[in-house]
Amino acid sequence: MDRLECCAWVLRGTLVRAAVRRYLPWGLVVFMLTGSLLKEFSPLPESYLSNKRNVLNMYFVKEAWTWTFCLLLPFIVLTNYHLTGKTGLVLRRLTTLLVGTAIWYVCTTLFSSIEHYTGSCYHSPALEKVRKEPQSKQQCHREGGFWHGFDISGHAFLLSFCVLMIVEEMAVLHEVKTDRSHPLHTTITTLVIALGTLTCIWVLMFLCTAVYFHDFSQKVFGTLFGLLGWYGTYGFWYLKSFSPGLPPQSSSLSLKQDSYKK
């Protein structure tokens, strides 16, 4: 077994377990609460990851949904078609990405609006003096001011939502069996490694958000929105017939919703 196969085997064996899907949401809550309390009462020393301009934040987290979308798209197409052979079902399942995009857009727009309507423009980061003239956040920054409002953590929201969505979609690997001679084997193996690596990065940066950034309540609300986005889709709507559905089960080439969630 070469290194690529070994890496895929480890990630596959870890991330597709039912226990991971069952307990990961609770784990994210624990990570957020523990990290936030640590930041409030026993702050960690500054590090490379506490710098907002670190490589992972600049080139991965800021484009978290783009990375997640672009890797899940071929993964869903290949694995779902391999199991069912039905183009219609594959297209139906791909709408999960459109739903995810809508959730990302609505939530980030809502967060921005809340920060705008609860914020004020200050002369300094110390928030000592408010500028009297009404301004937007963008105008405030252009004029050298500092905007302060209730800034719900977009990182906490998006990273938790992306991690849970990836793990839900990778559950299909329980049914995908290909040997090395299969034309799709190398492609699926590469996607498993890419998605597994991305999941590790998202969890790491979620922890960094908890430990280094935002106020306690801002992170709690961000995480709550991420969990609601996941549960509202995979835990409720996708169990219905009028939905994109859950990843297929090959035993009957259909969506075994009950057994998938056990």
Image: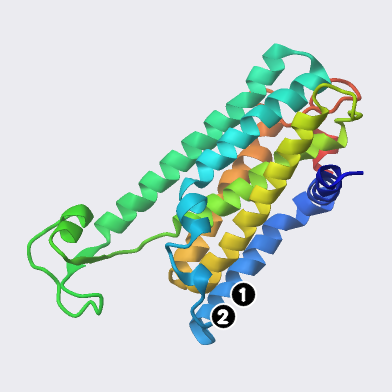
Residue 44, x across and y down, in percent? 54, 82
* Residue drawn at 51 percent across, 83 percent down: 45
In the image, is residue 57 above or below residue 235?
Answer: below
Disc 2/disc 1 C-alpha distance (Å)? 6 Å
Looking at the image, residue 96 lies above or below residue 253: below
**What's the amino acid at mark 2?**
Leu
- Above or below, comparing residue 105 to residue 123 in the picture: above
Q: Circle 2 sits on which residue?
A: 38
Q: Residue lying at the far bottom in this picture: please name it.
A: 42
Q: Residues within 10 Å of mark 1 (few under 14, many from 20)?
A: some
Residue reaching furthest left? 133
Q: Give 161 or 258, whichever is nearer the viewer.
A: 161
Q: Is residue 176 left or right of residue 232?
A: right
Q: Is residue 54 visible?
A: yes
Q: Secondary structure at mark 2?
A: helix
Q: Is residue 3 left or right of residue 138?
A: right
Which residue position is annotated with label 1?
Answer: 34
Give how far across and how far down residue 202 sits, in percent.
60, 54
Q: Quadrant of residue 125?
A: bottom left
Image position of 121 (left or right of 221)? left
Secondary structure of the residue carrying numbered label 1 = helix
Image quarter hosting the C terminus: top right
Q: Residue at x 76, y 57 (%)?
A: 23
Disc 2: CA contacts within 10 A as few (<14), some (14-19) or many (>=20): some
Q: Which residue is rendered at x = 59% and y = 25% of the image?
A: 95
